[in-house]
Amino acid sequence: MTGGGTPITRESAEQMLRANDRGGYTVPNANVYPFQWNWDSAFVALGFRTFDEARAWTELETLFSGQWDDGMVPHIIFHRPADGYYPGPDAWGTNHTPLTSGISQPPVAASTALKLFREARDGQLARRRAQKLLPKLIAWHRWWHETRDPDRSGLVTCVHPWESGRDNLPDWDAPLAAVTPVIDVSALRKDLTHVNAAERPTNDFYNRVMTLVEQARALGWDGARIARDLDFRVCDLGIQCILLRADRDLHVLASALGDDRAATEVGHWIARSDAALARLRAPDGSFRSLDLRTRKLSPAVTSATFLPLYARAIDNEAASALANLFDRWMARVRFAVPSTDPDFVSFDPQRYWRGPAWLVMNFMIADGFAAYGFAEIASRIRADSAELVRTSGLREYFDPRSGVGLGGRDFSWSAAIVLCWDLTA
Ligand code: GLC
């Protein structure tokens, strides 16, 4: 096991990915998350890319083996039974083959595919694999832009906190408060046998999010009805920006592969999303998530506020405002980037997405700052990330004040970021 005190090397990070490899897909963590998770796999593939390109493509292909007929790519694929996780396939009741959950996750995969293609050492292999994946990527993005944006507003709908990948953000407090819990699942939880309760979401949170699963089941997992009728409907700033960046990358990929029709379709999505982003900007200049039912912007500013940089979706003036905001946050914590504004009332440096730093967010935020010419900030985020893993190991997330490692150990996406960002250099 790799943990604080044991130096992380490229070899140990590679070894961890290999150890979490279940044959074509990689579990995020052997105990807490024993199946394939969607955006985890997209980052994991970036890690594999550094030492095994073919295996990196396989990670994405196995993920897309769970794609639904309507284009949705589920957030969990239960390729084979495993103990230790709730909610498993029975609780989702989607009856899909392979067994899957019924919601999606931030669409990072197209950005990974472009990187695998563009920076391929084996160009022929990359072209072959990218050609096969392209229509599936297009179908998934179309699902976001059509099924999840029934009014073609340019803002896509997220119907579940787990879909955002940033499960218990303060952003979801008000929208979840409007969901009346109809079940009590506290006795069914398994995460608390692996991780300290203070670092995990509460039982009340679980009861509400599982109530949403019950609602979707009652709608027969009909995508169109879910997007219109579920009691939780938000535009998650994270998904919105990650999708926009992934659309730009998909556009480049489709063009490079000579699929002009696909490129044109993606171009329309990009134009619509670009125009819509201003609706997520608060009067103080920060970007936030939007409750689509109440039309209220979230009272919290989270680390996704920096993702419009990653999406290349703002002008230089807005980018400078984000650089100033970053400096303000860093005057309050030691390690970049806290998941929630350290001045926000419910900031909690140890609880999941309410404060801790996550390497995958750091990677995307640094990419954004670098693209806008803020090289110093980008290097600061990278250096902090390197120090976090050096002192605390490949943990799931980290206390941004003390650097203490939190959540699960031996985490695949943390190993992947170490490899693709070269954090041991
Ligand atoms: C947690 C995270 C989510 C991630 C999953 C597997 O649920 O919030 O983003 O995909 O763990 O690592």
Image (cartoon, grey):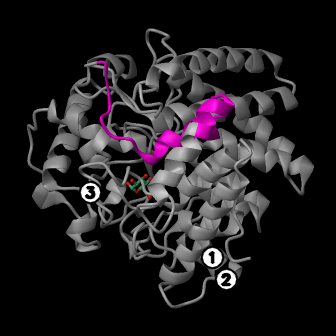
| Gap between marks 2 and 3 measured at Cα | 33 Å
Q: Is residue 140 magenta?
A: no
Report how far apart the C-alphas of labels 1 and 2 lie in the structure: 6 Å
Examine the rendered structure and indicate whether residue 314 appears above or below residue 331: above
Q: Quadrant of residue 139?
A: top right
Q: Quadrant of ligand 1?
A: bottom left
**Label for residue 13?**
1
Residue 69 seen in render: yes
| Label 1 element class | helix
| Residue 315 in magenta stretch | yes
- Helix, strand or loop at label 3? It is loop
Mark 3 to mark 1 CA distance (whole Å): 27 Å
Q: What kind of element bears circle 2?
A: loop
* 39 left or right of 30 in image: right
Residue drawn 50% across the image and 10% down it? 152
Identify the residue under disc 2. 9
Measuring from the top left, give residue 113's x and y in whole percent: 72, 44
Q: Earlier in the sequence, mark 3 or mark 1?
A: 1
Which of 298/46 is in front? 298
The percent coordinates of residue 255 (x first, y second) are 83, 26
Residue at 14% over, 54% down: 203
Q: Which residues are magenta?
A: 295-320
Location of residue 2 with respect to 357 vertically, above or below: below
Q: Nearer the viewer, mark 3 or mark 1?
A: 1
The residue identified by callout 3 is: 86
Tell me the amino acid under the disc marked 1.
Ala
35, 230: nearer the viewer? 230
| Marks 2, 3: nearer the viewer | 2
User: Is residue 151 shown above or below 121?
Assistant: above
